[in-house]
Structures are given as C-alpha cells and as structure tokens.
Image (spheres, helix red, strand yellow):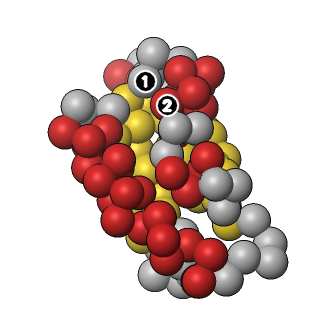
Amino acid sequence: MKILAIEKEFKGKTSEDFQPYLKDEARSVWDLYKHNFIREVYFRSDQSSAVLMLESESVEEAKKTLAELPLVKKELICFEFIPLVTYPGFERLFK
C-alpha cells in the first residue's frame, strides 16, 4: 500500500531543539529508504517539512515504523498519514 506521510512540527520548537538529533534522523531515514519502506523523500520548498512516500502493509504499520524516528520520539515532529489507491479515472476511457 502506498501512503503519503506529511511531517508536522510541534508548535514552539526551535531549530536548536532539532539540532542534536538531525544526524540520527538522517541515518534512520536512510535505513528505511534502503529497506524500501520509504520510496521517495522530499522537503517542501514553501516550508521546512518533509514529505515521504511510503510502501507499507497498512497505515498502522506506517505509524508504528515512523514512530521510531528520533525526531518523533523526542516529540519534535509527527506525521499526517494519507493512504493512496490507484487512480480509477482511466477506466472511463475504455467503457
């Protein structure tokens, strides 16, 4: 299942709050990328937050996996999870 995960920062956090954990965060994201859990990773150009395309058995599994990221564990960020399905509109072309 494809899942879009959009990072949200908790209010009141500063860049200094994040600094001690950024290298471990990058290492953890890289590990999930190498294991094909994170298929694509982007940073938004209009704000400082990540957007991840995940491959997961379920939204619950995705939540559990990303809950292990250092920035999530330190309650600096959380994610909005959006499950995706294949676009069905092309079927209209063949009916």
At 48% from the left and 71% from the top, the residue drawn is: 20
In this view, the residue in front, 51 or 83, is: 51
Pick whichever, 27 or 33, lies toward us. Answer: 27
Q: How many marks?
A: 2
Residues at marks 2 and 1, CA–CA distance in whole angstroms: 9 Å
Q: Position of residue 94 (x, y in %)?
A: 35, 22
Of helix, strand and loop, which one carries label 2? helix
Contact? badges 2 and 1 (CB < 8 Å) = yes
Quadrant in which residue 49 is drawn: bottom right
The residue wearing badge 2 is: 65
Amino acid bearing label 1: Ser
Residue 6 in view, yes or no: no
When the figure is inspected, residue 67 is found, relative to residue 92, above or below; the finding is below
| Of labels 2 and 1, the one closer to you | 2
**Badge 1 local density, few (<14 within 10 Å), some, or many (20+)?**
some
Q: Position of residue 86 (x, y in %)?
A: 43, 28
